[in-house]
Amino acid sequence: MRWPVHSATVTVPTSPIRFAFETRALDNGLQVILQPDRVSPVVSVHLMYHVGSKDEPSGRTGFAHLFEHLLFQGSEHVAETEHFRLIQEAGGTLNGSTWFDRTNYFETIPSNCLDLALWLEADRMGWFLSTITQEKLDNQRDVVKNERRQSYENRPYGLATETVLHHAFPEGHPYRHPTIGYMDDLDRATLDDVKLFFESWYGPGNAVLVLCGDFDPDDAFRRVDRFFGEIPPGRTLDRTQVLAPAEGANAVVKVSDSVTVPRVYMMYHAPSFPSPEYEASVGLSTLLARGRSSRLYRDLVYDRRLAADVQAYVWPLESVGTFWVVATARPGVTARTLQEGMEETISSLADGVIEPGELSGARNRARRQLLLSLESVGGRASSLAHAAVLRGDPEYVNASFGRYASLSVTEVGDLAASLLVESRRTVVHVEPREPEERPDSAEDASP
Amino acid sequence: MRIDRSKAPEVGTRTLLEPVRPHRSRLDNGMGLVWVRRDRLPGVSLSLVLPAGADSVGVESAGIASLVGKLLPEGAAGRSAREMAFWIDGLGAQVGVTVGYDAMVLRVNTLSDLLEDVLDVLAAVALEPDFLPAEVERCRGERLDAIHRLRDDPADVAADVLAELMYGRHPYGRLARGRVASVERLGREDLVEFHFDRFAPGVATLVACGDLPEHFPDLVERRFGSWRGTAPAMDPPDAVSVPEMTGIVLVDRPGGRQSVIRIAGIGLHRGHPEEPSARVMNAILGGLFNSRINLNLREDKGWTYGARSTLSLRRSAGPLTMRAAVETGVTADAVREMLGEALGLREAPPSEAEMEMAAGALTRSLPLKFERNGQIAGSLADQVVYGLPDDYWATFPGVIESVSRSDVHDIAARLLDPAELTILVVGDKDAVRTKLEELGSVTLTDAP
C-alpha cells in the first residue's frame, strides 16, 4: 500500500523558546543554576549528584540506588521519617531516582517553602553519615528487594531490559547491570560500603543544584549559600573511563516469562547523550516508532498485523548510548517472525529514502514533546540538571529546540545507515513460559 | 556564617492559590466553551468533554465507550485511518481519548503555531468519525488481544477482579475497557449508535488552556458551529452502599514473586457532604508517604515497596481502596496489618499531627496542581463533569481545614467497617492460602 506521505508536510515557523538562567558556584564547589519563572507560585529544587550505578564497586550492583533510599532515612537534624512528612505537609511533592550515570533528589514546593527544601537537602549532604544504622540499612534493603520484585520480577517482561544489557556489554562494563541490582549483591551491602560511597561521591563538588520557579535569583543564591556554604568540598574524584563497545551480542538470546505473547527487544549501541548525533538518534526513533504514521507502526501494526505495539527510544547515557526497538507480537505470531518483520522495516529505513514530510512530522513531534517536558518547573529543573551534569552545558536545554527543528534528511539518513546495523545489535526474545514450567526461586533472578 | 539547623526553617503556611479566571461562552448550537490564555510557552492543551463515559452502559456492553474512543481517530471525515495518522503525526500533535467512568474526554496537545490545523483534526475526530468496517474489525481485535495480554500483570488482574467483586453487574463492576465477552459482541452499528446518541453540541464542552489567540472563539465557531443533534445528559448510575462480595478472595498466581493485595470498601460520590472528611481520612490512612499503612508495611517492616490508599470520587460512590504488593511469605501478616490500621482509625480519632499533615498536603499543594496547561484544562474539565462551582478551589482550603478529628473518626467508622470490606489477594495459592484462612474463610476465584 502506498502511504500518503506528501500530505504530512507542514512547515512550522520555529518558535524561539528560551529559558533565561544563570550559573553560579559556592566556594565549596557546588554548582548552582537559577532559572526564575514567576508565572506560578511554585519552585523546584533539584539536586543531582554525578554518581550512578556505573560507579558501584564490584559485587555491589544496586548499591547506588539502595544508597539513594538511605538518604531519605534522616540526617543529624532531620528525624528518620520526617523528610517526606515535612515536604508533603508543606504541599510539596518529592522523590529521588538513580540511573546509570547520576542520582537525583528533588522537591517541587509552593514558593513560600523554599528554605524547607534547601535545609533538608543540605542536611543530608553535610550531616548524614553519623545517623546511618544497620537497622535502617536492613529495612531499606528489604524495601528495595520488594521494589525489584514489584517492578521487575513480578511484572510482565520486567526482566527483559537487564537481560539485554547483560548480553550487550562485556564483562566488567559499568552499563552491564541494571540500576536496581541483583538480589545477592543487595544482600552483601554493608555499613562500610555506605560510608565509603558517601565519602567518595556525595560532596558538593560532585553535585549540581538547580532551582526553577518563583524566586528572586540573588535572594535565592544567598539562601543556598546559607544552607550549603559550610559543607566542606569533599574529595576530588578520578572517574574510570567508560569505553563504548562497538559490537553487540551475536546470537539471539531467548528467555521465558509469565506472558501471553512474545516480545522482541533489539538494542543498538548508539551515540551518547553528549554526542553531536544524539538528536538525530531521537529523530530516528521517532520516525521508526512514535505515532501511528511511523514506519514500524504502519508496517507491523496496520499493514502486516504482526505486532500489537511497537516502541523505539533512546537512553540519554553519558558514555555510550543505547537505541531500543521493542515490539510485542500479536497472538499466533512467533518472536522469530516478528523479528524478521522488524528487520525488514529497519533495513528499508537504513538503506532507503527518508521523505521530507516524514521528517517534518518527526521534528514537530520531538519539539512538542520537548516543550511538554519543559513546561513544569520540575521537568525543566531536571532537564537543566541532566544537561549540566552529563554534558557540562545547561545551555543545551535552550539549544535543543533549534537542534530538533533543523534536523535534516541527510543527517538522520546517514545515522540510520551507520547505526542500524547487525554488528551493533543485541536481540532478546521473551517467550511465553510453558504451563508446567514454574519460575525458579524468587532470589535467583540474576541472568 | 553558621545557622541554626536544629529545627526546620519557618516557612509560609498560606495556600498560594492563584485563581484561574476562564472565559466562558456557548456557541449558538449549545456547545460550551471554557478557555484560559497563558502565553508563557507556545503550547496549547485542549479537552473536549462529552457525557459518554463507561458508567452509562450495562455490563453486557462494557467496553463500548472505550472502543468508540479508540476508533475516533482511525478514519474520519472521509480520510482513511492511515491518512489520519499522517495528518496528526505531521502536525506533531498528541491526540488521546480518555474514557473514564464519568465522561469521555478527547485531549489534544499541540504547538500553538499549529492550533488551527489541530482544531480541524479535533473536529473531524469528534464529529465525523467514519467507523470504517475494516478498522472496526482491526481495532476490536487489538482491544481483545490487549485484554488477554493484561492478564499477565497481577496488578491488572487485581483491578479487574476487584471491580466485579465489589460492584457485580453495576457499571462499576467492569473496567472501562470491558471484558472479552462484551467486547466480542460489539458491532459497527453499536459503535455508530453510541456515537450518535452521546455526541451532541448541547452536552459537549471544549476546554482550552495555553497560548491562545484572542479570537479563539471564532476559530472554534468555524469548526464546531455547524454541529447539530441532541443528546441527553446522562444521570449517574445508582449508588451502591455495600460491596456485593465481602471477605477474603484469592486469585491463584502460581510462582508469583509477590502477592498483590487490595482491601476496599464503598466510598462516596464526588460532591458528597462528607467528601472533605473522607479526603482527610484517606490521607492519614494511605494517601501520603507518611500515612499509617506505608509507615507500617514499608518503613517499619520492609515488606513492600509501598502501601497506598485511594479514594475514587466518581459521579456515584466509587471505592476506597488500600493497596500493596508484598513479598509472598508475609501476605497474611500484611493483610492483618492493613486491616489493623483501618480498625485503628475507627477506634480512635487521629492525632493532631496527622490532621495537620493531611490538611497541609491537601490544601497547600494546590499551586502545584494548577501549574501546567494540561492540569488547568483537566481541572476545568472536572468542573464540567462534576458540576463544581467556580469558587470550588478557592473555598477548598477552608473546607478541608474545618474538618475535625471527630469528623475523620466518624467517616472512618462508616467507610471502614471490616464486615463491609472486600479483601482480594492475587498470589501463589499454595504459599499463602493456609495463613490467610487464619484471618477468615477464603474464597478462590479465577481471573476473568
Image (cartoon, rainbow, N blue to C red):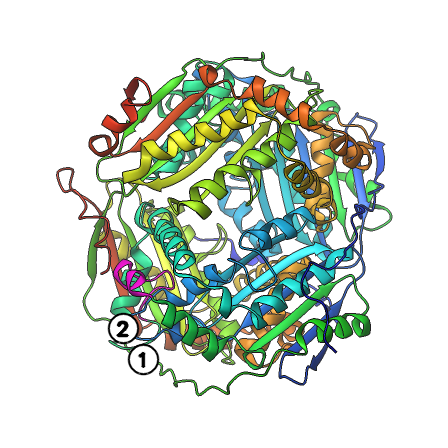
Give the side of residue B199 with respect to residue A273, left or right. right
Name the image quarter holding residue B31.
Answer: top right
Q: Are the residues flagged by discs 2 and 1 in contact, CB closer than 8 Å?
A: yes
Q: What is the x, y in percent for residue B416?
A: 52, 21
Q: Residue furthest left?
A: A436
Residue B105 belongs to magenta span? no
Give the side of residue A196 with respect to residue B4, left or right. left
Give the side of residue B30 with respect to residue A197, left or right. right
The answer, for residue B326, to whether it is visible in the render is: yes
Marked residue chain, label 1: A
Q: What is the x, y in percent for residue B303?
A: 37, 44
Marked residue chain, label 2: A
Label 2 SS: loop
Residue B72 numbered mark, or none: none
Label 1 SS: loop
- Asked if A139 appears above or below B190 in the picture, the reply is below
Residue A245 numbered mark, or none: 1
Q: Amino acid at mark 1?
A: Pro
Front one among A148 and B28: A148
Q: What is the x, y in percent for residue A3?
A: 47, 53
Q: Residue at x 73, y 41 (%)?
A: B363
Q: Residue at x 33, y 59 (%)?
A: A161
Give the side of residue B6 with respect to residue A327, left or right. right
Total numbered badges shown on the rendered structure: 2
Residue A187 belongs to magenta span? yes
- Within 10 angstroms of label 1, few (less than 14), some, or many (20 or more) residues? some
Q: Amino acid at mark 2?
A: Gly
User: What whole-number distance in Å separates the C-alpha atoms at marks 2 and 1?
Assistant: 8 Å
Please identify the quadrant where the C terminus of chain A is shown: bottom left
Residue A248 numbered mark, or none: 2
Q: Which residues are magenta?
A: A176-189
Q: What is the x, y in percent for residue A164?
A: 29, 63
